[in-house]
């Protein structure tokens, strides 16, 4: 009955029908549209998202089936597997993937699932340990990314991966911190065990970050270490608080062990800073002025302070404010000498502060032995602040030294080329007019508020 | 079926890689259909061209800004955007109080000696269809001119498949009656 009508309607689609667009207009419009689209596409690289997997599956299966049947089934199976055994998280192929790898999104998604499951099925202490485990993984990833940077040969990308991973690490640390507070309030009987686990992970994380920090002078890594150390101290303080309030039985020995553990960690940090300072100075020592003047520093006088500083009272110990102001200017003999002097002075102060810190840590140990735990912890916190500040200074010094060494190396190579040119063509006189911009010391601002 | 899979792959490329070439391919597939759909309502070539340009750019922006939203069908999306643009067009025209064209025949004025092909059969069908409800017009166009399934039409018109089947049946019946009475 309607066949004729349908046929008539199909006539509307005929090529000569007015209802069809002009071919020329179609092409012209397409060109304009593609131009507008191309101008608006950002250069931001597309990152793989886990949701793309469902989009890929929906190419072959009906969309509604993928989102209403397949996806819930897969999520349910994943949650079930994670809840009943942790093998997916620990053994799965994605466990070794690094930021930027294809499986990294899956790894993070698995951890997120584990987080949700643990929040529902476990208590605060397990959650705190889980967050520290995730932070530890992030630290290992940072270390591996930095190790791979030579192979990648892309400093910008490496820096971005490190920064992003550090942010995730800090987020895990914040979550662990919150859970520690929760445990001290709602499960005080578990605080000692939690604190021990946190202290162990703190050391592991800081060791990995130290390794990474040796390769790249990244301010984010230094900040992250600060946060990690703080969470360790917070855990110890939580134990002390529980003991003082009497909410759970905590032995004196357990508290002493925890505090001594923190002291040992800081001692290790101080040693590490000393080593890094020595390495920085050695690098600068190899740089001589181009006109033959030797402004070589006396390494021993920089590394070994001339006198042993005395500590009058604990209140006089504040965070070191050793600074080096950096500006760009033309490097020449005068400035190079100034650089060496300023760096030498800074490192000298760093080492003096280090010696002070070691002495103060010894005092803290004495306080612990005498059961003056609160005083000991306060001292440890202050020394931690000082150590972190000196570490920042050493990082800055390393950057300055690296720039100077690089610049001098370039200059030497250019001189070699010029000499060769001069020797082959004696009538050609070439002056080395290379001027370079490199961070050098313009003003020296070294004020050390550590009164001795 | 192959066409559907091809479209899904193109859509996936747009979502994952912001692939403009993939969008260009989808434009090639749909431009004529959407043009007919819009022209059927607007009856003005220039306005239709403007609307079509706008529709495809809006669809592109929607796909890029909402990459995480599931898009079941590109066809449904582009027709919906076109329909919304037509509604906006009518609203603006109502504000300006322009006169709507009743005739589907372009009359060449003294200054414009454009040759117009008058297809009598097309003219007759269009006249008849224009007498029907908007809903009936859309369903007839999408089903019999553009060969869309009832599910796709339902997605465009935001109705259930059952409703669309009922509307289609009534529209076809009405069209038949009007065609017979016109004769």
Image: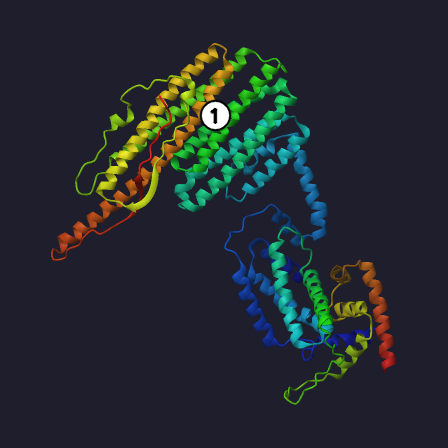
Query: Around disc 1, counting alpha carbons within 10 Å, would you say few (fewer than 14), some (14 to 19), or many (20 or more)?
Result: some
- Whole-percent x and y of residue A234? 54, 24
Q: Quadrant of residue A322?
A: top left
Residue drawn 53% across and 62% down? A38
Q: Is A139 positioned to the left or the right of B96 in the image?
A: left
- Identify the residue under disc 1: A203
The one of B116 and B119 positioned closer to us in this rendering:
B116
- Please tell me whether residue A184 is drawn above or below residue B25 in the rendered image: above
Residue at the outermost top position: A370
- Please tell me whether residue A233 is drawn above or below residue A424 in the rendered image: above
The one of B175 and B66 positioned closer to us in this rendering:
B66
Residue drawn 56% across and 42% down? A105
- Please tell me whether residue B162 is drawn above or below residue A139 in the rendered image: below
Work out whether residue B143 can be spotted.
yes
- Secondary structure under tag 1 reads helix
Q: Chain of mark 1?
A: A
- Whole-percent x and y of residue A441? 30, 39
Residue drawn 46% across and 21% down? A380
Quadrant (top left, top right, bottom left, bottom right) of the N terminus of chain A: bottom right
Colour treatment of the image: rainbow
Quadrant (top left, top right, bottom left, bottom right) of the C terminus of chain A: top left
């Amino acid at each position: 009955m309607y066949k004729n009508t349908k046929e008539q309607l199909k006539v509307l689609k005929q090529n000569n029908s007015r209802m069809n667009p002009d071919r020329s207009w179609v092409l012209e419009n397409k060109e304009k549209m593609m131009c507008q689209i191309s101008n608006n596409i950002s250069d931001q690289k597309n990152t793989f998202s886990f949701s793309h997997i469902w989009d890929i599956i929906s190419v072959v299966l009906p969309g509604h089936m993928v989102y209403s049947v397949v996806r819930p089934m897969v999520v349910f199976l994943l949650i079930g597997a994670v809840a009943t055994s942790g093998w997916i998280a620990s053994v799965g192929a994605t466990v070794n993937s690094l930021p930027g790898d294809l499986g990294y999104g899956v790894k993070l998604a698995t951890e997120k699932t584990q987080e949700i499951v643990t929040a529902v099925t476990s208590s605060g202490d397990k959650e705190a340990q889980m967050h520290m485990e995730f932070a530890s993984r992030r630290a290992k990833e940072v270390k591996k990314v930095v190790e791979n940077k030579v192979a990648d040969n892309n400093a910008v990308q490496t820096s971005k991966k490190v920064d992003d991973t550090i942010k995730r690490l800090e987020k895990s640390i914040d979550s662990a911190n919150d859970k520690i507070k929760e445990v001290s309030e709602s499960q005080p009987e578990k605080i000692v065990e939690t604190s021990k686990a946190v202290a162990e992970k703190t050391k592991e994380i800081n060791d990995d970050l130290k390794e990474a920090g040796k390769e790249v002078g990244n301010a984010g890594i230094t900040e992250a270490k600060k946060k990690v150390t703080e969470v360790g101290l917070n855990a110890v303080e939580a134990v002390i608080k529980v003991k003082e309030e009497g909410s759970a039985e905590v032995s004196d020995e357990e508290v002493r062990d925890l505090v001594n553990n923190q002291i040992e960690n800081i001692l290790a940090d101080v040693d590490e800073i000393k080593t890094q300072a020595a390495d920085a100075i050695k690098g600068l020592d190899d740089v001589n002025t181009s006109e033959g003047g030797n402004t070589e520093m006396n390494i021993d006088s920089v590394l070994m302070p001339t006198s042993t500083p005395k500590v009058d009272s604990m209140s006089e110990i504040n965070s070191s404010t050793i600074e080096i102001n950096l500006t760009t200017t033309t490097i020449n003999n005068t400035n190079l000498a100034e650089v060496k002097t300023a760096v030498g002075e800074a490192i000298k102060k760093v080492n003096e502060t280090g010696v002070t810190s070691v002495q103060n840590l010894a005092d803290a140990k004495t306080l612990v032995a005498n059961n003056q735990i609160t005083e000991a912890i306060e001292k440890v916190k202050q020394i931690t602040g000082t150590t972190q500040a000196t570490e920042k200074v050493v990082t800055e010094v390393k950057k300055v030294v690296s720039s100077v060494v690089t610049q001098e190396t370039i200059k030497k190579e250019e001189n070699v080329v010029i000499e060769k040119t001069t020797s082959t063509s004696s009538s050609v006189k070439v002056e080395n007019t290379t001027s370079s911009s490199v961070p050098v010391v313009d003003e020296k601002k070294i004020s050390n508020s550590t009164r001795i | 079926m192959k066409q559907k899979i091809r479209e899904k792959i193109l859509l996936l490329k747009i979502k994952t890689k912001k692939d403009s070439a993939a969008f260009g391919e989808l434009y090639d597939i749909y431009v004529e259909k959407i043009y007919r759909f819009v022209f059927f309502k607007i009856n003005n070539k220039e306005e239709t061209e403007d609307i079509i340009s706008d529709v495809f750019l809006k669809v592109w922006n929607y796909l890029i800004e909402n990459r995480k939203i599931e898009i079941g069908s590109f066809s449904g999306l582009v027709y919906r955007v076109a329909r919304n643009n037509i509604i906006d067009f009518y609203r603006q025209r109502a504000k300006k109080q322009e006169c709507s064209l009743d005739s589907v025949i372009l009359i060449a004025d003294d200054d414009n000696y454009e040759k117009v092909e008058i297809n009598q059969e097309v003219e007759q069908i269009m006249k008849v269809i224009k007498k029907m409800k908007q809903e009936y017009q859309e369903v007839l166009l999408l089903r019999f001119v553009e060969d869309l399934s009832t599910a796709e039409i339902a997605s465009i018109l935001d109705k259930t498949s059952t409703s669309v089947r009922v509307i289609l049946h009534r529209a076809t019946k009405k069209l038949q009656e009007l065609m017979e009475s016109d004769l």
